[in-house]
Image (cartoon, rainbow, N blue to C red):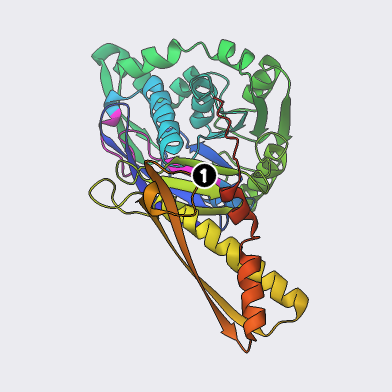
Amino acid sequence: MRTKKIEFTGSQGTPLAARLELPAGMPRAYALFAHCFTCGKDQVAATRISRALTGFGVAVLRFDFTGLGGSGGDFGNTGFSSNVDDLVLAASYLRTHHEAPTLLIGHSLGGSAVLAAKHRIPEVRAVATIGAPADPSHVAHLLGADTSEIERSGEAEVSLAGRTFRIRQQFLDDIAEQPQASRIAHLDAALLVLHSPIDKLVGPENARKIFDTARHPKSFISLDGADHLLTDPDDAEYVASVLAAWASRYVLADRPGEGYVTVTDSGEGPLGQTVTAGRHSLPADEPVPIGVDSGPTPYDLLLAALGACTSMTLRMYADRKQLPLDRVTVQLRHSRIHAEDCASCETKTGLLDRIERTIHLDGDLTPEQRERLLQIADKCPVHRTLKSEIDIRTTES
């Protein structure tokens, strides 16, 4: 598991602090985690669940909403709608730099937020809520007697979980105007509702309302004995394992197999790319000044493919024939030449591509064996592909 500290711009134009938890190998899916009201990305449950999910191949982005934790902005100027906007921007960050999230997870009011944000993140196929209120207006009761002061003065200092926050009337107006029931009824994604029957902060009747309002596919898991914040590590681990097992049906599809490669913008300079082949990832770029040289160029990768295929083909042949080949080194160079300078080429005008391949064979080989190996090099599959007619078909997904 790896943790990357990142930063992206939130709904109010201020930087939001985030952490991306990455599995050891190629992620099988990306998820977005929304924390509870006035909590933060480093709250115990958010941290434990996110890190536990990496063990199942899920990369999880968690961040501090505007005005909370390490994020900029004034919490007093935020509301439920701005939190949803922050979630959408977090998804955009993943889409641009990695891969769009297909799973949304929300804890407490964060659960309400992911239900609202789903409609603005088209790639999402599954949503999970943990101890979430059926309607954002539920949090108004946490303000208690301060509600009257907010309505009278337009704002008030409110103590929540041992911390003081400035809550303004716009916050109350915002949570009262959310069409949450309609969003849940038309979620258009698989839904998992996790809730403790002894949750004293957000009663279990909220889970029933969410579940009854939603359409199938939907599932409910009771978190017996857990408190609202999932402070027991075992409860957080349990939630993560249940989430992973459930999500495997909807979002944890295996990566494409042999023959499939995906290339996306990496965000490294103007031309940086991330190449994904199966469970492997590598960068690609152009040298300075066109790019920032964050990885090999496309032609470097093309030569690498031919070189690797050449070396593998020679190794397999030598092993099968029991030849004393100790090591193969292949050096390649790509250039453009005038066709008139190539006596053996069919093309006689203009420019054409030339690949110079030098093969060094280590081992106690006879001249005949060396000559045969050089002949075999031309039978490498990539060599044959480059020399044959190629049909490239382009479609838009």
Q: Residue at x 27, y 24 (%)?
A: 77
Task: Judge from the rendering whether residue 7 lies leftward or rightward of residue 316; answer left or right.
Answer: left
CA neighbours of label 1 inside 10 A, class few (<14), some (14 to 19), many (20+) = many
Rendered position, 28 above or below 334:
above
Instruction: Report the predominant secondary structure element of the magenta stretch.
Output: loop
Rendered position, 322 above or below 234:
below
Q: Where is residue 219 drawn, in percent x and y?
A: 73, 29
Q: Where is residue 337 drawn, in percent x and y?
A: 36, 51
From where the camera sits, is residue 30 visible?
yes
How many marks on residues? 1
| SS under mark 1 | strand
Q: Which residues are magenta?
A: 59-75
Rendered position, 176 above or below 249:
above
The quarter holding residue 267 reads top left
Q: Where is residue 75 drawn, in percent x and y?
A: 30, 30
Q: Residue at x 56, y 49 (%)?
A: 386
